[in-house]
Amino acid sequence: MAVSQLIGARVQRREDPRLITGHGRFIEDRLPVGLLHMAVVRSPHPHARILSIATEAAASAPGVRAVLVAKDFHAQLSGTMPVTPAFAPEKKYVPERFPIASDEVCFQGEPVAVVVADDRYLAADAAELVVVEYDPLPAVVDPEAAMVPGSPRAHVEGPDNIGWDMTFDGGDIEAAFARAEVTVSERIWQQRLAPTPMEPRGVLAEYSPYDERLTIWLSSQNPHFIRLFISGAMGIPESRVRVVAEDVGGGFGSKISPYPEDYLVPAAARILGRPVRWIETRTESVQTSYHGRGQVFTAEAAALRDGTLLGLRLTQVLDLGAYHGTFGAFQACACLMAGGVYRWAAVQGRTIGVLTNKVPTDPYRGAGRPEGTHLCERMVDRVAQEIGMDPAELRRKNFAREFPFSNNFGLVYDSGNYDGSLDKAMELVDYSGWRQRQAEGRQQGRLIGIGCSTWVEICGFGPSEATAGATGGIALVEAAQIRFLPSGSVAAYVGTHAQGQGHDTTFSQIVADTLGIPMEKVELRHGDTAEGPSFGYGTYGSRSLAVGGMALHKAAMVIRDKAQRLAGHMLEVSPDDLTFEQGTFSVKGDPSARKTIEEVALAAYGGKLPEGMEHGLEATSYFDPPNWVWPFGAHICVVEVDRETGAVQVHKYVAVDDCGNVINPMIVEGQLHGGIAQGISQALYEEVAYDQDSGLLLTGTMTDYLVPTMNEIPALTLDRTVTPSPTNPLGVKGIGEAGTIASSAAVINAISDALSPLGIHHVDMPASPDRLWKMIQEAES
Amino acid sequence: MAQLVRLTVNGSPRQEEVEPRLLLVHYLRERCGLTGTHVGCDTSQCGACTVLCNGQPVKSCSMLAVQAEGMAITTIEGLAPADGMHPLQTAFWEEHGLQCGFCTPGFIMAATALLAENPDPTDEEIGRGLEGNLCRCTGYVNIRRAVHKAAAAMREGAGAAAPMGG
Ligand code: FES
Ligand code: FES
């Protein structure tokens, strides 16, 4: 391969000029002629029976075109909303979910009726006029209470509230604990979070009755899966449904799965024969966009007094909400990743999914991996504290060092250098200096703490063999198509879809380098199911580069091979006698005999092709990765807790991460900044809170749900090591979720360390001043 | 009942009838076709809708179109001539100050007002000036960098321009 020019370079993003000048193309920016606006009437109760719905007043309000309830949609939509097996394939109770409730509402915000009107103001007015009579039922709020036999049920018809209950055995856990010289146990809370992309969701649909074609525009990470689900429900062949997601204003996992409105809007468009649009308000978003986390863990770790880790046993109780999220069971991977970067004799994880009367949970940045990492890193610190060993030293004593490394569950970490990232982070943060300052500070009563998080993640989903079962038949691979047009420019299509990750730029870097053409000649397209390969698998799980980028690379190599054969024919030599460098095929030993790849592309559409060669220069490729990829790193956070107020100040935050080879360092840093900020924010600020008795949402608007401003995020010091992945030809891994996976543990370890002189060993999230102040008061009294 | 409103948007005078309850942000987006001003919330928290009213930053979701009577409104589309970029836009681009870009117009408009008042803000002053704007993608690191960079560029530009201006 030619010496690369673009791969590895800090190329400025090509998506930016439109976005910084106000010319982005977000869902709400599209205003087709004849557009009607939909507003959704939602249940104010967490759990209730619907006794009646009176729509007459709303239907006769000004500008109203229709008021629709469940029975109107039953004629349009069949089946139930999908639930994939993911990491908990053996489900117990899976309540059926129709996009709109008919007899029973099971969470606050569940749709019960929709109003379609000439403008959004009129739709909102009329929605207020729909009168729904409810008979409230007891709400199931606390997942642990909901597991107890005899608990009220989240669905009156349900047998109980158990969505799944599975145990993963990784080695002989009893034997591991039998050898223990020390054990520690902890209860670790992962609060519910609202993903809160700055652009709320939105759906616009247009149905053409004459040719039975449906077009849906929506803000989605996953347009092809949405096409699959909606076409099935509406009984329209997949080939006649087009789903388009243009610029997407953030997703963080909350725009992967289908939502009720994704079905209701197209169905309303088909009923009314007009384009219909629904744009989520922020209050609807906090209330009904799928939440993340919502788990409580009990864990026990066994070790020897010299710091050798032996066994880890954990139970994850996962608050599913009122229905299984389509990909919600993915979060059970916390159990499989709970061993982290360490060698354990055995790990055992039990996961229990429990139904409650809340909005469903689903993947949110990291999905299971932040939870697993948080748990592992907390438990390792607890062991270190128990035996009086420095937590960095204990980590080092137990690091996996030989790769490929098979963890307790047989997952194979492709490459790693955990000492490398920890060494570098310790040096950058001045670890020994801070330990010294901490000791001195303690003399004066200051509460300084240092927290490490040496993390690893599983990402880059596929491979097909492992994921076909998990997604209910469609294996996760990725598809790309490249078309080399006669005049020398290239159109490249990929089945992933960015929401800020800069794929236009990084993927064009790959295509341009592989084909030896300038980046300006590459047009990168994604997010439209009418273009490119038959299927795309979406952007989530830090998979886009390691799977989608590789599909593009693979397609580019197919094109290059064909171009080389054609160039050989044009130059009358064997293709093997050609070299390819910087976009030019030259005859070995006679560099004056040459053809540029653009010349070859033109020839591919002309006459005189070699015997048996088809016309054109294009390729479609699917990349099925042989393994996942395994990024890793070391984060170290230094905090000080104010004894008087409980406020946390972050003195220093250092992150040394390793995602293998890097296509564009600027973008990698940006992904880390944002990811770390979200993890810090979980550690310190965010929580979706419900009233424990009534089940009503307490943080129902952005006024109550704390999204951090610039002033809440500390300065971040980043560095990296580079350990290429052997899993793909470019040696790349993923970085979209890394920051979030690593950072909550670093912050909470630091706070727990700061409070340890008071006898406090563990702090739950969010570590708000209020929570810490109470803990300090209690400890001191 | 529709009401007449006269105002200037990005330098062009406009006069039209609007519903009294029409929000300024919807007027700009749907009547003027200026969709660069975004709506990210319904409680005046996110700042995605920030525009300049007579040079002052305003959350256009919390103002009615009719309240803009007689005012000069500048939106992200009007910040620089069609073929050029404002130093803040250039700096956001160069410093990777945006990812999804949804919050970006609001940040750039708020920062424009900040730099007009304070051409050389400290980190803290930037934090205070932009505390009404939320970004979920960038962790704010590169937004802060971009504002510093633009401030420096504008100070230099202003210094160079001063003698010419007399
Ligand atoms: S739209 Fe959020 S502040 Fe205006
Ligand atoms: S760039 Fe996405 S919200 Fe700021």
Image: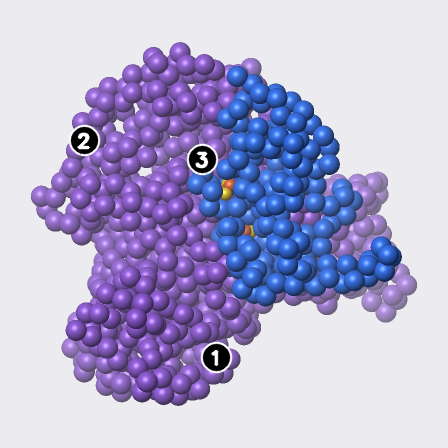
Q: Are marks 3 and 2 in contact (CB under 8 Å)?
A: no
Which badge, 1 or 3, comes first in the chain's sequence? 3
Cα–Cα span, label 3 and label 2: 26 Å
Question: Alpha-carbon neighbours of circle 2 within 10 Å: few (<14), some, or many (≥20)?
Answer: some
Q: Is residue A753 left or right of residue A92?
A: right
The reply to whether label 1 and label 3 mark residues of one chain is: yes
Q: Secondary structure at mark 2?
A: strand
Q: Quadrant of residue A382?
A: bottom left
Kindly identify the residue that appears in the image at 52 percent across and 17 percent down.
B1
Q: Where does residue A593 sit, x and y in percent of width and height?
A: 89, 61
Q: Is residue A584 visible?
A: no
Task: Give the amino acid at mark 3.
Answer: Glu
Q: Where does residue A406 sit, x and y in percent of width and height?
A: 38, 70
Q: Quadrant of the N terminus of chain A?
A: bottom right
Q: Which lettered chain is shown in purple?
A: A
Q: Secondary structure at mark 3?
A: loop
Q: Secondary structure at mark 1?
A: helix
Kindly identify the residue that appears in the image at 41 percent across and 66 percent down.
A743
Q: Quadrant of residue A264?
A: top left
Kindly identify the residue that appears in the image at 24 percent across and 73 percent down.
A761
Task: Give the amino acid at mark 1.
Answer: Val
Q: Quadrant of the C terminus of chain A?
A: bottom left
Instruction: Residue A136: give its label.
Output: 2
Cα–Cα span, label 1 and label 3: 43 Å
Kindly identify the residue that appears in the image at 73 percent across and 49 percent down.
B85
Which badge, 1 or 2, comes first in the chain's sequence? 2
Position of residue A90 relative to residue A717, above or below, is above
Q: Which residue is mark 3?
A: A280
Instruction: Residue A429: give its label.
Output: 1
Q: Where does residue A141 sit, x and y in percent of width and height?
A: 21, 45
